[in-house]
Image (cartoon, grey):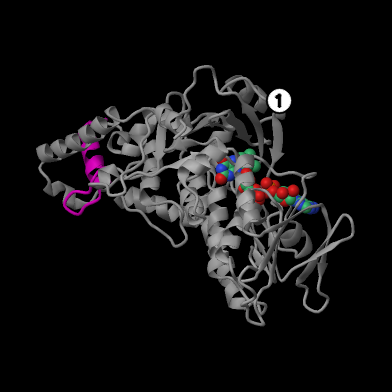
Amino acid sequence: MNTASGDRLSPNAIRRVVIVGGGTAGWMTAAALSQHLRHTGVRITVVESSEIGTIGVGEATIPTIRRFYAQLGMTDAEVMTATQASCKLGIRFTGWSGAGSDFIHPFGLYGQDLRGVGFHHYWAKQRQTGDQTPLAAYSLGAALAFGGKFIEPSPTPPSSLSVFDWALHLDASLFAQHLRRYAEASGVERIDARIVDVQLRPEDGFVRAVTLGDGREVEGDLFVDCSGFRGLLIGEALGSAYEDWGQWLACDAAFAVQSENGPGMEPHPYTQVTAHAAGWQWGIPLRHRAGNGLVFSSAHMTDQQALDALMPNLMGKPLMEPRRIGFRPGRRDRAWVKNCVSIGLSAGFLEPLESTSIALIENGIERLKSLFPDKTFAPSIIDEFNDQSAREMERTRDFIILHYWLNGRDEPFWQERREAAIPDTLARKVELWKARGQFVRYRWEMFHPASWLAIYDGFGVLPEQLDPAVEGLDPGQLANSLHQMKASVAETVARTPSHAAFLARLDRPV
Ligand code: FAD
């Protein structure tokens, strides 16, 4: 119990945290705060409505998820078993530059730097000689993914050539249940009821309580709004406006459908994202079923056209009727207002092209932990939280826009995306890449240079100028070094067992 060691709190301390919502965001927050605030006497309550339910999608993650649950003391094997998860080494983009185009954005590095100069300069130099070796041949993560192989990365990789990371494809509802069990065992109280009203204190407009359908009130010092798109507290009660990013990201709807895994199909160790006429389709293999969906622009595609594009291309027989989800890309103007912090969909939404939403939840939770307030709610704390959240969302947005802006497809939707204006922050990055093969890394940026390299190369955008130091390496020596890197990656892939074999070991009783 939170209170097991008695009340050690100072008079101004937050004593009662109320988390509104029990989706992925709500239970991740409850689990993490219950662990962080253990033995302090802080009471944590989750109010969720089983009548309303959760969004239930959100099954592809990035590697930070593993660090999130490791902090809670959970192992990979435990979470993978509880959530029917498969392993994910990256995201495979098919058809984004037209028919036949195909590349992987892996969680890992490419090649080795030579004589202090970035690998990609040498690789691009070699390209100029007509060598068409794909970039993926120099990335263990990408090569394993393409080969359907999986091995856990070495904790002490001998060189950057062996550096890769991995994430999970997981069943979102099983994940929420697992976190709920953890949180409840740590003393978190759960109330299953519909919130019908929010009570603000007349003197300062802070949230005092939420009112439940049966008239009960749940009071708190700090409220975390995890109520989903609606933003029950942060938007409806406290009026934080929603900044709409529709001018940059035109997709505004999705159909999601679960399917069987195809007969004899081995789950691939990557998230599949395939471009369609006015959007893209995801394919996420779990162990007991697959997640499928189509994200599209309703201005360019009717619901029927979207379904006609999605349903014949599922990973197996559908297990349900497809569900339509409308959304607005964007973010809350202020993620934290007075005594209410929004985490999850209530704070903003970016389409799941790079599986970033759950990672944004993790970072929101970390931010809340590191800036945890007392009852004075110092404005500097709130401003810092809001600033960091806004910057992180904008950087992530820019990375997603890049995929659309560089596309090479012919349909009107894609032509428009190519011609659309992009944010200045992104334009600056792309210009520098083209001009000198350099990466800009802003603060609160989720994606590393290797991720940007994967996308630039995937869309065939190479730098116009390279580091002049590459000219100092003899062409024969360069070709030889690259050959050795490629051979080393290929050799590791050849002796690695399949992803299916790795998963089968998890299922075997110990
Ligand atoms: P929800 O799941 O909507 O939970 C809201 C909670 O609030 C529920 O418990 C509900 O009962 C409760 N609630 C609401 N109103 C009330 C009320 N009045 N009273 C009481 N309780 C209430 N993310 C990824 O990282 N990877 C992906 O692959 C991915 N794919 C996605 C695909 C689509 C099409 C969409 C739309 C999203 C995707 N996401 C993905 C995002 C991911 O689904 C969400 O970030 C994640 O599920 C968190 O949702 P949430 O908990 O904020 O909201």
Note whether ligand 1 is within 8 Å of mark 1.
no
Q: Please determine whether, in this image, residue 305 is positioned above or below residue 248.
A: above
Residue 170 can be seen in this image: no
The amino acid type, in three-letter code, at marker 1 is Gln
Q: Residue at x 26, y 33 (%)?
A: 492
Q: Determine if the magenta segment contains residue 119.
A: yes
Q: Is residue 128 left or right of residue 168?
A: left
In the rendered structure, which segment of residues is drawn in magenta? Answer: 111-132
Q: Please determine whether, in this image, residue 37 is positioned above or below residue 102.
A: below
Q: Residue furthest bottom?
A: 11
- Quick one: SS at disc 1? helix
Which residue matches tag 1? 304
Front-most of residues 469 and 485: 485
Q: Residue at x 16, y 39 (%)?
A: 481
Q: Quadrant of the C terminus?
A: top left
Q: Determine if the magenta segment contains residue 384.
A: no
Q: Position of residue 452 (x, y in %)?
A: 40, 47
Q: Quadrant of the N terminus?
A: bottom right
